[in-house]
């Protein structure tokens, strides 16, 4: 027959082991969430950098495609009737 003390000790031991297991699982969930959030933020920043670089390339390409117009011959808006 198991003494009252030993039963209590076994109960405390089981509760402690169970608590440690659950805390460990919760910590893994939190660590995974932090990792996933960090990855998403990094991907978002990378997207922004890539968009900025693409915009700069597009502006440079557009500047290269504009015809060279001598000074004084640039398109001038002569008004509605082309006066």
Image: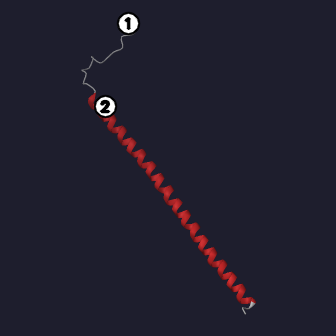
- Coordinates of residue 72 in the picture (x, y in percent): 27, 17
Tell me the quarter of the image containing the N terminus: bottom right
Q: Residue at x 41, y 49 (%)?
A: 46
Hey, which quadrant is residue 12 in on the image?
bottom right
Helix, strand or loop under label 1? loop
Q: Considering depth in this image, is 45 or 22 the residue closer to the camera?
A: 22
Q: Residue furthest front?
A: 1
Q: Residue furthest bottom?
A: 1
Q: Which residue is mark 2?
A: 62
Hey, which quadrant is residue 23 in on the image?
bottom right
Q: Considering depth in this image, is 53 or 8 the residue closer to the camera?
A: 8
Image side of residue 34 versus residue 3, left or right:
left
- Is tag 1's residue or tag 2's residue first in the polypeptide sequence? 2
Tell me the quarter of the image containing the C terminus: top left
Q: Residue at x 44, y 51 (%)?
A: 43
Helix, strand or loop under label 2? helix
Q: Residue at x 74, y 91 (%)?
A: 3
Q: Considering depth in this image, is 23 or 47 the residue closer to the camera?
A: 23
Q: Which residue is mark 1?
A: 81
- Coordinates of residue 6 in the picture (x, y in percent): 70, 89
- Coordinates of residue 5 in the picture (x, y in percent): 73, 89
Q: Using the image, determine if residue 27 lies above or below residue 1.
A: above
Distance, label 1 to label 2, CA atoms, is: 30 Å
């Amino acid at each position: 027959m198991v003494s009252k003390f030993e039963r209590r000790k076994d109960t405390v031991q089981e509760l402690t082991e169970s608590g440690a297991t659950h805390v460990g699982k919760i910590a893994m969930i939190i660590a995974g969430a932090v990792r996933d959030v960090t990855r998403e933020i990094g991907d978002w920043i990378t997207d922004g950098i890539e968009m900025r670089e693409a915009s700069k390339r597009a502006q440079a390409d557009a500047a290269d495609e504009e015809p060279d117009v001598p000074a004084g011959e640039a398109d001038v808006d002569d008004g509605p009737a082309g006066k």
